[in-house]
């Protein structure tokens, strides 16, 4: 491998290289929720992607070692919540291992299909899972939109350089 002028020295593929590159990629922040028997589960995701308009499909990634994975691996429906810049702490709570994600600090209600729906988000969807595709130590979950509400107020929350940030214009 040789250096390209002005571009630095290329590095061989590794988990660290991938993480370093994607820290530079600003991504929207979502929280994925599901009902897990007697208690809800949820996690922060920056991997949310629109896949198809017809039928309306989206995808997100989840690690198979994540505490939410056992529920996501078997549930039929999930909630997808687009967070606003006023929800940095909520994003951090759902990203933190061992956090009481649905404790008193989290405002939510039971929504359609029994899915936990978070309050005060920019938008939310309830989706039916149609596939779980193996992808290394993760699964790519494909889900079809059942219903939702795009009318929340505010500006989007972004994840960049390892931090939650508001959108700057």
Image: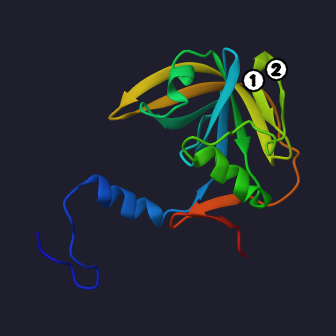
- In the drawing, does residue 110 fall left or right of residue 158? right
Q: Is residue 132 above or below residue 91?
A: above
Locate residue 89: give its quadrant.
Answer: bottom right
Residue at the outermost bottom position: 6
Q: Which residue is mark 2?
A: 112
Q: CA distance from mark 1 to mark 2?
A: 6 Å
* Quadrant of the snapshot with the C terminus: bottom right
User: Can residue 61 be seen at all in this image of the molecule?
Assistant: yes
Q: Is residue 80 above or below residue 162?
A: above
- Graded by Cα atoms within 10 Å as few (under 14), some (14 to 19) or many (20 or more), the crowding at tag 2 reads some
Coordinates of residue 17 in the picture (x, y in percent):
30, 60
- In the drawing, does residue 67 fall left or right of residue 113? left
Coordinates of residue 121 in the picture (x, y in percent):
81, 46
Coordinates of residue 107 in the picture (x, y in percent):
84, 40
Q: Secondary structure at mark 1?
A: loop
**117 and 60: which is toward the camera:** 117
Asked if marks 1 and 2 touch (Cβ < 8 Å), the reply is: yes
* Picture disc at residue 150: none
- In the drawing, does residue 150 fall left or right of residue 64? right
Q: Which residue is mark 1?
A: 115
* Quadrant of the snapshot with the N terminus: bottom left
What residue sits 79% from the left and 32% below the top?
117
**147 and 33: which is toward the camera:** 33
- Graded by Cα atoms within 10 Å as few (under 14), some (14 to 19) or many (20 or more), the crowding at tag 1 reads many
- In the drawing, does residue 122 fall left or right of residue 95? right
What residue sits 66% from the left and 41% below the top?
31
Q: Is residue 71 above or below residue 165?
A: above
Q: How many marks?
A: 2
């Amino acid at each position: 491998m040789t250096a390209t002028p002005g571009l630095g020295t290329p590095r061989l593929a590794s988990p660290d290289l991938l993480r370093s590159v994607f820290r530079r990629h600003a991504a929207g922040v979502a929280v994925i929720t599901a009902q897990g028997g007697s208690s809800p589960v949820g996690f922060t995701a920056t991997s949310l992607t629109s896949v198809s308009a017809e039928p309306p499909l989206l995808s997100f990634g989840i690690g198979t070692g994540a505490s939410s994975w056992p529920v996501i691996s078997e549930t039929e429906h999930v909630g997808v919540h687009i967070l606003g810049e006023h929800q940095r702490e909520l994003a951090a709570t759902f990203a933190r291992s061992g956090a009481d994600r649905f404790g008193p600090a989290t405002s939510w209600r039971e929504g359609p299909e029994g899915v936990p729906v978070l309050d005060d988000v920019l938008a939310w969807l309830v989706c039916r899972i149609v596939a779980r595709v193996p992808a290394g130590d993760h699964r790519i979950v494909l889900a079809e939109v059942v219903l939702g509400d795009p009318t929340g107020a505010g500006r989007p929350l972004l994840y960049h350089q390892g931090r939650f940030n508001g959108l700057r214009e």
